Image: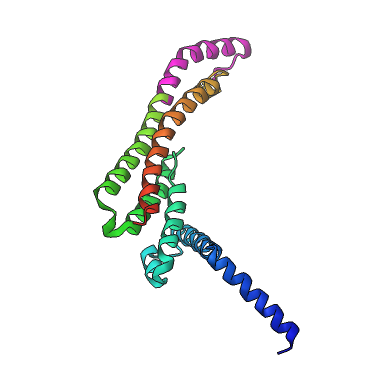
Amino acid sequence: MSDEIKSTMEKVMERLAAMDAAGGGQVDLGEEDRREGMRLAAACLRSEVASLNAELAAAPPQRQMALRQGMAGTLLRNIFLPREEEQLAPAEKAMAGLLELAGEQGGGELLRLLGDLKKILEQYLAHCRQLRQQLGEQFAQQLAAMEGNLARQTGVAMKLSPEQHPKFQEEWQRIQDELNLQYGRAVEQHKQHLAAIFNAGS
């Protein structure tokens, strides 16, 4: 080996040693493992990975905490206020993933938080349906008057839905913004508690 190559190799090794001493190597590896955990959790939500715990078990013990944190982060991001009934399913799948990930170490606190979270999402949907129906009923009388005017003007009887009233969407948006704020705050608080459980190295 020539002196020039040897000198270059020594510099590279010194740099690597300095990085390790500063903890730089570990940070990079931990971040890489977290990203890999996020990728695996996303694949699990798409049903491309059967078991997150099996993936964890296959990894070296020193990588498992960062992998688990990455997995939990992705699962938590997939729990959000559903606009439609069908959007409950992905959130429920994410919650089931968190439960699997915690295993025996999850305990009663995790079960309680997940149970509360599911209730919040279901109550949000029910509350949206109820208030939208009430809003439609409020506009029903005004719609009847509009239908009468249109029939007189055009000579054609028309049936209008509440959504066709000029003020309906504006009022519904205001109500929805309030609901999103109220329920969204509760969802975020629960997600923060859940994140703390996994970041504590459960």
Residue 79: where, in percent of width, then height? 43, 45
Residue toward you, 155 or 171? 171
- Residue lying at 46% horizontally and 57% vertically, measured from the top left: 70
Residue at 42% across, 33% down? 185
What is the span of residues highlighted in magenta in the rendered image? 132-158
Picture quarter with the N terminus: bottom right
Q: Main secondary structure of the magenta part?
A: helix
In reply to whether residue 146 is colored magenta, the answer given is yes
Quarter of the rendering occupied by the C terminus = bottom left
Residue 161 can be seen in this image: no
Q: Quadrant of residue 151?
A: top right
Left/right placement of residue 177 relative to residue 200 reads right
Give the residue drawn at x 28%, y 57%. Answer: 105
> Does residue 17 appear anywhere in the picture?
yes
Q: Residue at x 73, y 86 (%)?
A: 3
- Place of residue 142 in the rendered image (x, y in percent of width and height, measured from the top left): 50, 12
Q: Position of residue 47 (x, y in %)?
A: 44, 61
Q: x, y (%) of residue 110? A: 30, 48
